[in-house]
Image (cartoon, rainbow, N blue to C red):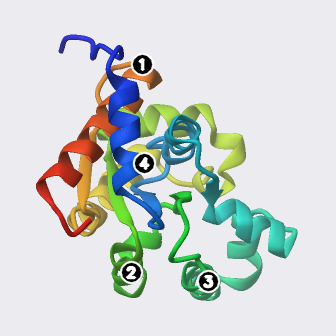
Amino acid sequence: MNKIISKNINEVINYINLNIIDKPIIFVGMMGTGKTAIGKMIAHSLNRIFYDIDENIEKHYHMKIYDIFEKYGEEKFRDIEHAEIRKLDTKSNNVIATGGGAFTFERNCNILNKIGLTIWLDVDKNTIVSRLKKNINNRPLLRDVEIDNYVSNLLLKRNPLYSKAHLSVTTINSSKIEMRNRILIKIKNHIAGNKNV
């Protein structure tokens, strides 16, 4: 794929900021897909605030996500996560990153699709596995599993649910800047084709 030329990207940014007002842009997808890294870049480009749901939960509870899982169990964590999603400012211009499982629950999916523009970062299994293996120390829940099979099973279960997002962007072997530009252009094209955005 040819590199996306960024000389007109300021026009794309201006178009987005003129047409998505008081509505968050929300990244969903598997862990290891770059929701936080890409979300921060998009927020910076659009001059908007970046908000990470998992980070906010960790600050509130003074615990890492995996510690909350370990101490309270997944069901309790999912209730905490849902409460955090319900508290989101529906009239904000924030760029939001969700946890990997958040969008796979209908109650969260419905809220996020209603309040914002949801974007699924669709990344192939091998890339996810490679990223997770490099970052295994920060993901203790993965230490005792066979990561390849774990990720394969999760993708089979979750991808049909992630596909309910308004937009999907397939991550390819490209730089973060190219990914940012592809996402911004995709958002612009979505707005142009949907006057209800």
| Rendered image: mark on residue 66 | none
Q: Nearer the viewer, mark 4 or mark 3?
A: 4
Please, what is the three-letter code of the amino acid marked with disc 2?
Answer: Phe
Image point 59% across, 88% down: which residue? 79
Q: Earlier in the sequence, mark 4 or mark 1?
A: 4
Q: Residues within 10 Å of mark 4 (few under 14, many from 20)?
A: some
Task: Say whether residue 154 is left or right of residue 35.
Answer: left
* Quadrant of residue 74 within the rendered picture: bottom right
Please state, as top left, top right, bottom left or bottom right, where the C terminus lies in the image: bottom left
Please state, as top left, top right, bottom left or bottom right, where the N terminus lies in the image: top left
Q: Residue furthest front?
A: 18
Q: Is residue 196 above or below residue 140?
A: below
Image point 36% across, 46% down: which residue? 16
Q: Nearer the viewer, mark 4 or mark 1?
A: 4
Q: Residue furthest right?
A: 62
**Residue 185 at what x, y percent from top left?**
27, 35
Please, what is the three-letter code of the amino acid marked with disc 4?
Answer: Asn
Q: Residues within 10 Å of mark 1 (few under 14, many from 20)?
A: few
Residue ID for mark 4: 17
Q: Give 52 or 5, whichever is nearer the viewer.
A: 5
Q: Which SS class for mark 1?
A: loop
Residue ID for mark 2: 105
Residue ID for mark 1: 175
Residue ID for mark 3: 87
Confirm or deny contact between disc 2 and disc 4 (CB under 8 A): no
Please, what is the three-letter code of the amino acid marked with disc 1?
Answer: Ser
**Residue 69 at what x, y percent from top left?**
68, 74
Confirm or deny contact between disc 3 and disc 2 (CB under 8 A): no
Q: Earlier in the sequence, mark 2 or mark 1?
A: 2
